[in-house]
Image (cartoon, rainbow, N blue to C red):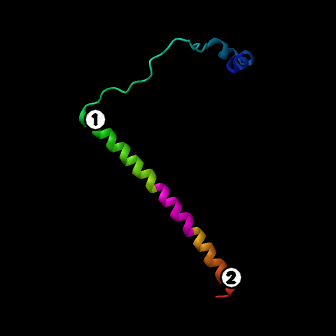
Amino acid sequence: MKLSKLFRRRGGRHLEETQAPELSNTFEEPNVEPNYSRTAHLKQTLQEKKAAKHQRLARRLNWIIFYLVIAIIVVYCFMIFINF
């Protein structure tokens, strides 16, 4: 018994009226990317490169912030225990 059927049975009337389509066992062709023109393909690869650079920069920035916080904590502890 599927979980969706279990919950639909106990649900309200509105759930019984809308039936979800059942999954069929037939083979469906996987989503194939359409053929792009050269300019569209270049534009898409440029956007992907920009997104990858942005994520890489964000990751580096997060690590720099982490190291700065650790450095501030170390300096603060040094100043407390050495009485600087």
Name the residue beneath numbered marker 2.
Answer: 80
Res 5 → quadrant: top right
- State whether residue 9 is above or below residue 37: above
Residue in the foreground of this view, choosing between 10 and 61: 61
Q: Amino acid at mark 1?
A: Ala
Name the residue furthest bottom.
84
Name the residue beneath numbered marker 1.
Answer: 40
Residue in the foreground of this view, choosing between 13 and 2: 2
- Location of residue 33 in the rendering, given as x and y in whole percent from the top left corner: 37, 27
Instruction: Specify the segment rendered in magenta.
Output: 58-68
Does 61 lie within the magenta span?
yes
Question: Residue 29 bears which disc, if any?
Answer: none
Which secondary structure dominates the residues rendered in magenta?
Answer: helix
Please tell me which residue is depicted at 29% across the width and 36% down the height of the picture.
41
Does 34 lie within the magenta span?
no
Q: Amino acid at mark 2?
A: Ile
Please tell me which residue is depicted at 69% across the width and 18% down the height of the picture.
2
- State whether residue 51 is above or below residue 73: above
